[in-house]
Image (cartoon, rainbow, N blue to C red):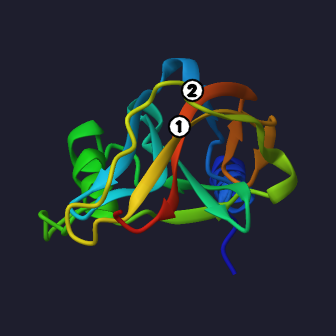
Amino acid sequence: MTMKSPFFIFCALLTLCSAGTASARDLDVAAAQKQEIRHGQIGPRDTLIFYTFADQDAVLQLDIKHEGGKFTLTGKVQLFKEGTGAEEIGKWINNQHSCGLFPDVPKPEATVALPADALSVVESKLKEGAEMPESPVTGDKFQDYALKIEVSELKMDGFRLKSFAADTGAFVKVGPAG
């Protein structure tokens, strides 16, 4: 049996202790690029909001739906491999709401669903004088709502998300073309 140097043992212990503990990413939407999607090829759609944290290789993805007379907000954080970069993450975002224009995009290393009690639509009101859009395919009509959303501070595996409030909008289907 050979004796290992104290430095070797220290390095081995340090490697074992740090394995699986990726550095936590600090996510603050004030420093993120926001992209909001409210229209698709067939007209108004559920609202998707993407906050890209290019320096953290992460995306906060929020989805606003209107069901049963109520707006619901869900979210998840997508964590990409270190060094992925804004351009590649942008291609991934495009594929989440369009026809998948980019075949070779990075895949998140981890997807973390946010707890429902940390996400809320705190205010919604019909926009005054807003044009009532309709689907170019089905002719369905939609009303345009202004929303205020809030996200609580979260510390989860691999990241910390700073709390924030934001203004956005959402469409609500009100019926077929008349």
Occupied quadrant, residue 72:
bottom right
**Residue furthest bottom as drawn:** 1
Percent position of residue 162, x then y: 72, 29
**Residue furthest front as drawn:** 178
Q: Residue at x 19, y 68 (%)?
A: 100
Residue 71 visible here: yes
Nearest the eye: 155 or 119: 119
**Residue furthest top as drawn:** 30
Q: Which residue is mark 2?
A: 29
Q: Label 2: few (<14), some or many (≥20) within 10 Å?
A: some
Give the SS element for disc 2. Answer: helix
Q: Decide: is 162 above or below 103.
A: above
Q: On the rendered structure, is 157 left or right of 34?
A: right
Q: Residue at x 39, y 43 (%)?
A: 132
Q: Which residue is mark 1?
A: 169
Q: Residue at x 34, y 47 (%)?
A: 133
At label 1, the amino acid type is: Gly
Marker disc for residue 80: none
